[in-house]
Image: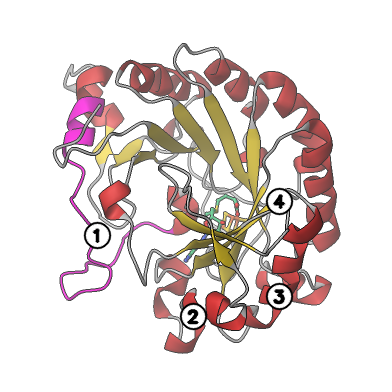
Amino acid sequence: MFDKQGRKINYIRISVTDLCNLRCRYCMPEEGIFKKNHQDILRIEEIEEIVRVGAKLGINKVRITGGEPLVRKGIVKLVEKISDIDGINDIALTTNGTLLKKYARDLKEAGLKRVNISIDSLNKNKYEAVTRGGDLQRVLEGIEAAKKEGLTPIKLNVVLIGGFNDDEIGDFIKLTIDDEIDVRFIELMPIGQASTWAKERFTPNTIVLEKYPKLVPICKEDKGSPAKYYRLPKAKGRIGLINPISSHFCRNCNRIRVTSDGKIKPCLHSNLEIDIREFRKLEMNLFDIFKNAIESKPRKHNINNHEYEPIIREMYQIGG
Ligand code: SAM
Ligand code: SF4
């Protein structure tokens, strides 16, 4: 389906839980979050129905995210149900990777195609510090498990944080030389925990190209991906730059989001939300709710200008 700006919307990102086994400093409060009542979270069957209706409206790509999606009970069953839906030809998962070694095989068998794994440092102590206790080794084992099961192409997400990991850009780039892995640097966004962070932390992604001018732009872009891709000469993998702050990609936005408590978010950087359960109480069918949500998608975000209204949701609620 096309929205009012003529953008084709074919991608849904679903957050299946707010909970997480890590406490990344820019994302989660140190003490964790208040656990919602079971009935306030979408059931596996409800998520399946949302995707089924989305598929009727032209959605063909699904990403499961969170919080940490692998702490959600029934996650493998959900992947299996979604992969059975006619019209869905791509199911991916964004994860911190710590539980991937345990789940990679089951997820692959259930129909998962690929994974994005978040990893903000390759240094054990720094990783532990930014995640407040995470174990880098488990993530590395998760990456290996994903490779072994063919959950590929694997994409590593690295949130670039000034004064923290900008000295590791080269180490991340090296990972792409011999492996068909994409490393994607993401600009830190002033959302939730990071909304009060010092200016110096918000390093623009342009520094990647300044430090590594040998990176060659890849002309053939991934359609619908917010990343601009580059490659070191002869490297197998790619470097992606995701620049929501320094150059937004609203014009090509093809996505819609659903939070774990059942709100459709037509735009990551807008507070507009459509409460699926409330509309259903008004006897509105899911098809129309979904269609209206797509139609209400804002033209662009205002993150860089004075009209910007801080986002009330935290990233662990939206799923990135
Ligand atoms: N737990 C999973 C993970 O970490 O991959 C999935 C959810 S997490 C919210 C999704 C992505 O959002 C991660 O790559 C994370 O680094 C990113 N993220 C969280 N807060 C962010 C922020 N303020 N700015 C930029 N990216 C952020
Ligand atoms: Fe958890 Fe992902 Fe947020 Fe880190 S970024 S706290 S892993 S939800």
Q: Which mark is residue 170?
A: 3
The span from disc 3 to disc 2 (Cα, nearest Å) is 16 Å
The residue tagged with tag 3: helix, strand or loop?
helix
Q: Position of residue 116 (x, y in %)?
A: 62, 47
At label 3, counting other C-alpha atoms closer than 10 Å, the crowd grade (few under 14, some 14-19, many 20 or more) is few
Q: Which mark is residue 16?
A: none
The residue lying toward the viewer, choosing from 203 and 218, is 218
The span from disc 3 to disc 4 (Cα, nearest Å) is 15 Å
Residue type of the residue flagged with mark 3: Gly
Q: Which residue is mark 1?
A: 301
25 to the left or right of 308: right
Mark found first going from the N terminus, 3 or 2: 3
Mark found first going from the N terminus, 4 or 1: 4
Mark found first going from the N terminus, 2 or 4: 4
- Vertical order, 90 against 217 (above or below): above
Residue type of the residue flagged with mark 2: Thr
Mark found first going from the N terminus, 2 or 1: 2
284 to the left or right of 275: left
Mark found first going from the N terminus, 3 or 4: 3
Assess mark 3: CB under 8 A from ligand 1?
no
